[in-house]
Image: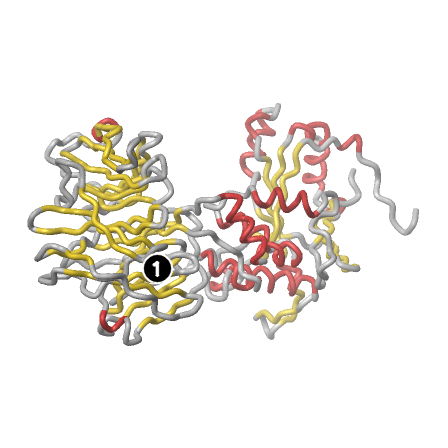
Amino acid sequence: MPKACHWISVPSGVADDSTPLSPDLPDELVHEILFRLPPDEPACLAGLSILSQPWRRLLSDPAFHRRYREFHGKPPMFGFFYELRKGDTADRFVPTTGSCPRPIPDHILGDFRVCDCRHGRVILDDSQVPSGFVVWDPMRGLRRLLTDSFYNECSSILRCSVPWTVVTTPHATMAPSVSSSLASKASETGERGTPTSELQLVEDCFLDGMPNVLVGDGLHIILLTYQGCRILKYDLGRHCLSMIDLPVGVAGYDRGTTLMAAEDGGLGIAHLDKFMLHLWSRDSGLDGVAAWTQHRVLDLKSFLPIENPAIKVEVIGSMEGAAIIFATTALGVYIIDLKMVRSKKLWDRGNLRYLFPFMSFYSPPAKPEEIFNKLGLGTDMGLLCDLLVCIKRLVDDDVEKIKSFPMETTIPFRERLKILGRVANLEDLPLSAAERKLMHAYNEKRVLSRPQHHFFLGDNYYEVDIDMHRFGYISRKGFETFLDRLKICMLDVGLTIQGNKPEELPEQVLCCVRLNGIDYAKYQPLMTNGA
């Protein structure tokens, strides 16, 4: 019989900056491992950051976050902002990952209209303030209101970047004006940039609300006119405007055309003709003159669930830095990977007007109580706070009062500690019919650890021991019959605190571990009292 089952060690105290991240691996190797964590699963970074203060300090460090972004390059997509057709109202953000940071899906835009979204920042038009715009960083919850005299003349924001730069045009419709100029404002200085020289335009033209595309140093947006459509380009480096004609036969006002980055990194166009998607790229010839080239034609019926030919498909946006576009039908919103030639449904609601993908990197906050709150995994003060409170009450041997007859009774908080245990690969074990019946009946049952538990608090550790000698006779004999089969068992074991009040439910797991392939014959008895 084993003398005791040693359970858990919880670090206590505050580690200094010299504390190693791992007792077995050098910090440089740990850094390289952490760089390879998937950026589209922020729960991985959040989970590691609560292991210890050195890990949390590293993962929240701006220098590490900068290298993490450089390693992965393109940021992941956490969801998308959208604009419905006129007259419809709904929430304006849809998360596309299970652990999307909380400030985004919980945020209600209200009277704000999304103008642009790029590099983790969103530009909003405040309808309550005439010509008032807000630059919003959802990941950090920061906003900056732009309402000075420069922006009081503007009603369209075209671009944001890092450091963010806002590009504006004097009139959203620009009609009946026959000329236009743009200006920019940078985040570093907050100063208004020099306006561009005016560009002569045709009468009765206006900017399309379709998301603009940043390719190289050029910002591109579709310009609609009664004579046809063209592309307005703003060169961010030279601060000048120019016009680009669309390919012959491509219309920009039929909800079937969107600008995008081509596979070679240049300017591209995705044009939809019924169910045939025509992909164009703008390439420079031997003479240095740029021209449009159609390089692919895809049949959307081959990878979109389109059985009824009467269903209308519309292109509503693209993802910068990737050969990806977004389309909407009456059945929902789809993301289309043009390189892999496949699609995925993002949302059941269809017939959107525009879609702005939100792409960014998640950085765990430095304060532990904010980690789970920002991921939306907790309630009230956050799941992490509840776990820390429970662990602290265990370590401090806290007591609590309970109602009993004829008066209140004080009992230790540790009396509510429960064991959760199961055999994960039960069907793979050689069991008799009686054993299998008992295992199915009692596997995954939760039991209070009292009175078999013992608690030990030492220097930078907290230990919970379960003395199996004090188990009931049937439990001890049953465990003895499993000793030779432990080596082929996968055991999942955890601890939780019994919830006695509605606010303590559902019960949260304090810790858990998987024990795989335990060979009991190879273990030595634990020494006690120096013996």
**Where residue 389 sits in the image (x, y, percent)?**
60, 64
Residue depicted at 23% across the width and 38% down the height: 270
Work out whether 346 lies above or below 276: below
Task: Specify few, some or many for label 1: CA neighbours under 10 Å numbering under 14, 14-19, or 20 or more.
Answer: many
In the orientation shown, which residue stands out farthest toward the front?
287
How is this picture coloured? Answer: secondary structure
Q: What is the tally of numbered marks visible in this picture?
A: 1
In this view, the residue in front, 493 or 376, is 376
Q: Is residue 226 left or right of residue 52?
A: left
Asked if one can make out residue 330 in the rendered structure from this viewpoint, the answer is no
**Where residue 430 sits in the image (x, y, percent)?**
62, 23
Residue depicted at 80% across the width and 31% down the height: 522
- Callout 1: SS: strand
Q: Is residue 502 left or right of residue 9?
A: left
The quarter of the displayed image where residue 474 is located: top right
**Where residue 524 sits in the image (x, y, percent)?**
83, 37
In the orientation shown, which residue stands out farthest toward the left?
226
Asked if one can make out residue 342 in the rendered structure from this viewpoint, the answer is yes
**Where residue 181 sits in the image (x, y, percent)?**
23, 62
In this view, the residue in front, 73 or 358, is 73
Q: Which residue is mark 1?
A: 122
Work out whether 38 lies above or below 20: above
In this view, the residue in front, 331 or 160, is 160
Q: Is residue 480 left or right of residue 56?
A: right
Q: Quadrant of the N terminus?
A: top right
The quarter of the displayed image where residue 343 is located: top left
Residue depicted at 53% across the width and 62% down the height: 500
**Disc 1 residue type (three-letter):** Val
The quarter of the displayed image where residue 388 is located: bottom right
In this view, the residue in front, 368 or 342, is 342
